Image (cartoon, rainbow, N blue to C red):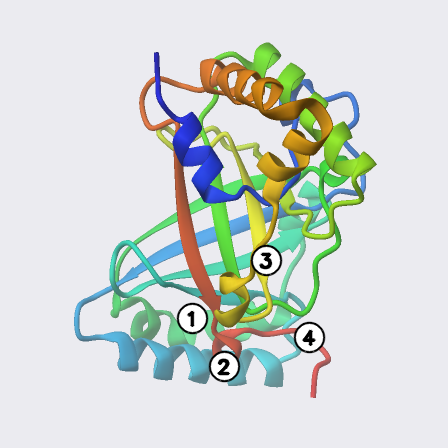
Amino acid sequence: MKNIKTMLLSAAIAGAVCVPVSADDHEGDSDPILSIMELNIKHGHGMQFREAMTTYMACYEENGGEDGWSTWATVDGAANEMWIVSSMNMWAEMDADDPGDEACWPEHASELTSHIANANRSLYKRMGDWSGDAEGYSVVKLHNFRVEDGEAFRGVVGEITEMMKDADYEHMGTWYGSVSQQRWAADYFVVEHFENFAAMDEDRPGPDGIMKDAIGEEGTVEMWDRMDESLADMEPYWNNILRRVDSLSYSPGED
């Protein structure tokens, strides 16, 4: 038997649970699709990449760029890794022309990409019914899951969701389910939000504490065992910590 339970408990998962996108009849039509572009910056090219990105952003804004994004730097894991995150409400948005991109990408693409070792894009849909409404955060922790038995996973996480709602848990995470199905990528992940790094020192009860209050210690252990059994044998869980890079993030219309 896999022993993921200990990792899940110590991770203090953000207190929401999800249902797979492909099988969830509660999925909201208005839930956005998240695009995550993971960039590995060449060793020693960090400053040059930032400068090239800043130049591109200035051009993009000047030419009426319509898309927004946030940029995040990894705190753990591979060095010099950045994530550029954007969202869209409908797939049709990918067909739309972007005047800023059309004007600036041909001119600045070569300089920008010359500092990137490799890139990978993944797509996820927000699971609105299982997510909170976090705001005012600059640090996030992603808890990633690969699922083997979707039906069993849906059952156990549905029960946990109800406990979190009943307890009015204040640190609800934001859940996403994969729509791109890449090999070894997470099937689902939940974002745990922090105002800053100091907030990570706060003593939060997490779902484990909430469940112990609701169903007792023995029932909580059984619940984690059920979740454990629903996960994949290989790479069932991992987490990432990232911090927002405001200087490389862009929102149309912001001063």
Please rate how many residues cluster around mark 2, counting C-alpha atoms within 10 Å: few if below 14, some from 14 to 19, many from 20.
Answer: few
Mark 3 or mark 1, which is nearer the start of the sequence?
1
Q: Is residue 176 in sight in this rendering?
A: no
Q: CA distance from mark 3 to mark 2?
A: 20 Å
Q: CA distance from mark 4 to mark 3?
A: 23 Å
Q: Quadrant of the N terminus?
A: top left
Helix, strand or loop at label 4? It is loop
The location of residue 171, given as percent across then percent down, is 68, 52
Mark 1 or 3: the one toward you: 3
Helix, strand or loop at label 1? It is helix
Q: Which mark is residue 252?
A: 4
Where is mark 1, residue-wise? Answer: 106
Q: Is residue 179 in sight in this rendering?
A: yes
The answer to whether residue 42 is above or below residue 227 is below
Residue nearest the viewer, comparing 143 with 61 = 143
- For the residues labelled 4 and 2, say whether their Cβ atoms are less than 8 Å apart: no
The answer to whether residue 218 is above or below residue 255 is above
Mark 1 or 2: the one toward you: 2
Q: CA distance from mark 1 to mark 3?
A: 36 Å
Q: CA distance from mark 1 to mark 2?
A: 22 Å
The answer to whether residue 155 is above or below residue 125 is above
Please rate how many residues cluster around mark 3, counting C-alpha atoms within 10 Å: few if below 14, some from 14 to 19, many from 20.
Answer: many
Helix, strand or loop at label 3? It is strand
Mark 4 or mark 1, which is nearer the start of the sequence?
1
Mark 3 or mark 4, which is nearer the start of the sequence?
3
Where is mark 3, residue-wise? Answer: 193
For residue 222, side relative to residue 132 (left or right): left
Residue lying at 57% horizontally and 51% vertically, measured from the top left? 192
The location of residue 87, given as percent across then percent down, is 63, 53
Where is mark 2, residue-wise? Answer: 247
- Residue 48: quarter of image: bottom left
Give the amino acid at mark 3: His
